Every structure is written in structure tokens, then in C-alpha cells.
Image (tube, rainbow, N blue to C red):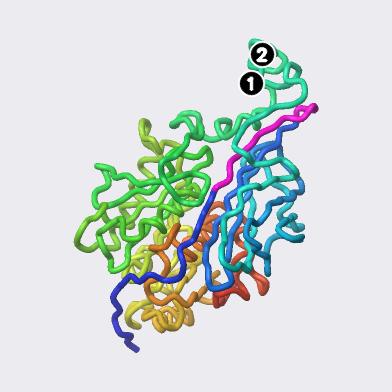
Amino acid sequence: MKYPRFRSRYVTAGVAGLALAAGAVVVTTAAEAAAGCRVTYAVSSSWPGGFGANVTITNLGDPVTSWRLTWSFGAGQTITQLWNGTHTQSGSQVTVTNVSYNGTIATGASTGFGFNGAWNGANPVPTNFALNGTACTGSVTTTGAPTTAGPTTAGPTTAGPTTAGPTSARPTTAGPTSAGPTSAVPCTRQPGTGGGSGPYPAGYETSNSLANHTIYRPDSLPCEKMPILAWSQGACSANGLSAFNFLREIASHGFLVIANGSPNGSGSSTASWLTQSMDWAVAENARQGSKYYGRLDTSKIAVAGFSCGGLEAYEVSNDPRVTTTAIFSSGLLNDANDYQLRRLTKPIAYFIGGSSDIAYPNAMDDWGKLPSGLPAFMGNLNVGHGGTYDQTNGGEFGRVMVLYLKWRLKGDQTSGRAFVGSNCGLCGTQWQVQQKNLTL
């Protein structure tokens, strides 16, 4: 059976998302417990009278075993459906509490939830978030008796290193500088000039040692090691900025993204360029003097691509370093290539533009031929072949790809619940969902 070839073409679909990362606040109680949070609120999609949003909470203080997030809507918005949390709303006041499986948030860890809402006339992003009663204002304050146990505010000259110095007292209150490899570039958070809705504003760069590629990364490298995404563009384009908003959004959530093609490059890529991306990342992680030395998680690598780029991702999906494959609006063009499906052993996800997507029949044919027992997700969003890559923060495809990578490459089970089970976060939404062998 042979399927018609399809060419990549970009269209603008849906309404651009809005994103705002709330500031962080760290306070200390009289007992010297530290509390603080960072909240990312992203409007991922919007339609007349309704919208979808994703909220991520990052705990910057001591570990918590339960949480309550509050905010006020500014224009009469209401929540109509919420997953990965329990909500109540009284007028403009919203309270979301944890469910049984996501109440515990370690220091520096994140959890999140999503919801659909209704709006009329305006949909401004809330700014007055509070976690367990502590406002996320972007400032740092302390209370209690810092001279007895406050190394982060008093310093060794007032508390003495033998009783409350930074090496012996609450390193978790000092922020991200307490984690990650000490031999690499310092991981102190700096204000970023990049973009994306994640906690690490991101931009892009190039490397002389990796020709024909564009590297998307956080402006300030996070303390935790970054998983890696190797990406191939639509039309197998050698322009590394073809999916700029989408790829920068992923990087802003703590991933290193290496895209085929130099910035505004011309010509076409090959699947070997994805292999070059993986080779380069592994080498840079091991090279002393590299900004990425010890900062990459080379055991967690995804390969993905859009349209023609999806075909290139298929070609390298059997590389032993690959953790998962993601196929966007793509499918094998003829049965002679079905061997690429039979050799799949790692989880795969498909994100397709619905029945109007020219790649839809190819993708669905591939879906039906996947090896028995292979963990697989199929999501169709009715946006056509062009997807949402050009929308703010990559639109809905950007939001969902971040969730998928957090699950598969960072082990974030809260994000994984968007894909798993009959009541998954994407189930019953604008997405049409199919699942095979998925477990958390």
C-alpha cells in the first residue's frame, strides 16, 4: 500500500497562548522553616468563550507534603474542568489543592495541573498567586531569629560556621546553587533575556563544532541535568529557526534542544544530522571546559520531528541512546519502510493535526502497525498540518510536548497523567486521544 507524499506547509492555527511566570518568594518562620514558590501560568489555547491553561508550581523552600494554591481572576473567568487537582471558586477567588498523588513537592521540584475555563470579553493572566498562604512576589524576606539558625541571611560572621554556617545548615534554602555538578558553570539563577513560559528563559546559539544546527538552551543553565531533544524541521528544512517559538518553549523548561539546520539556513537536512546532535551532546557533556560539562543527562534523549522531519526521526529511533520518539504530523510514506516500525522498542508519541492533516492517514496507518506491547500515545488536535508551532510558546503543541518530555525524560508522573488512563488530562478535551500499553 502506498500513501501520497505530503509536503510541509505552515499555517497559523488557533489563538496565540499567553504565558506569565510568577515571581518567587522565600521566607523563614520563627522555627526557621523556609517557604517559597514559583508559579508558571500558561494559557495554551483559546476559543470563543473558553480557554485552556496549564499551571506549574515550583517549590523553592522546604519540602511540603500538601499544597494549596490560591489566586484571583481579574475579568470574571471561571474554571469549568480541572485535572491533577481539586478546585473551588467563589466569585473571582480560586483555590486549588493537591490530590492524593501529587501533594508532596521536594525542594526545587515541581508539580502542576491543568484546566479548561470560560471567559467573556477579556482573559488577563492572574498575578496574585499564593502557595499555602505565602505570596509569590519575587522578593525574599525572613522572619524569626536568624542569628540562631539562619545561615542564608546572617552569614558565617554573625552565626559562626561551627553552629550555623552554610555547610551545615539548610542548604536547600539557598536555591538552585546547592544542586548539580560543582565542576560546571555556576547554576545561580540569573535574569534571562530569552523567552518561553518555563522557569528558565531560553534563547538559541550555534557551535563551531556542530555545523548546520541550532542549539536552544536556557540563558542560565539549571542546576539539574538537562535532558536532550534532537529535532528535525518540517520539510526537512535546514533552517534551525523554522519552529522557533515551539523549540524555545521546550528549552525554557530545562531541556537542551538541538535542531537540524543553522539559523535561517537553506537546503535540506538528513537523518544523520539527528545522530550528529546526539554525538555532540554526549561529547560536550564529557568535555572539560564546555559550558555543558556534567550538565546534560545523556541517558535521557528524545528524537522528534515535524512532517518530513518526522520521517528522519523514525530513521534514528533505533539508536540505543534514544529514550523516546515523538512524531508530529507525519507517517511513513509506503509499506517498504514498515521495518522502521517493527524495530521500535522505546515509547513513542504521535501529535497529529486531525483528519484534515494531510499526514493523518499515514500516521494512523503507522499506529495500527506498531509492535505489540510498545507504549504509545496518539493525540489528534484539529488544527491541520501546520500545527501550532508558530503560536506564542508553540501553542497547544508546545504545551503538550513539554508535558510529554517532562514525563518521559524527567520522570514527572504528574505530567504523565496528561497521557495515561481513561481520565487522562488530555482525555475529554479538544484532543482526540488513543493509548497503547501506557502506565505511570
Q: Does any portion of residue 436 appear in the rendered image?
A: no
Q: Are marks 2 and 1 in contact (CB under 8 Å)?
A: yes
In front of the other: 297 or 40: 40
| Label 1, residues with CA under 10 Å away: few <14, some 14-19, many ≥20 | some
Relative placement, left or right, of 359 versus 414 is: left
Q: Residue 375 carries which label?
A: none
- State the extent of the magenta-drawn residues as a range: 21-32
Q: Quadrant of the N terminus?
A: bottom left
For mark 2, what is the residue? 161
For mark 1, what is the residue? 166
Secondary structure of the residue carrying tag 2 is helix
How many circles with numbers are drawn on the protein?
A: 2
Residue drawn at point x = 50 percent, y = 29 percent: 182
The amino acid sitting under disc 1 is: Pro
Secondary structure of the residue carrying tag 1 is loop
Q: Quadrant of residue 102?
A: bottom right
Q: Does any portion of residue 63 appear in the rendered image?
A: yes
| Label 2, residues with CA under 10 Å away: few <14, some 14-19, many ≥20 | some
The percent coordinates of residue 266 (x first, y second) are: 20, 59
Q: Quadrant of residue 305?
A: bottom left
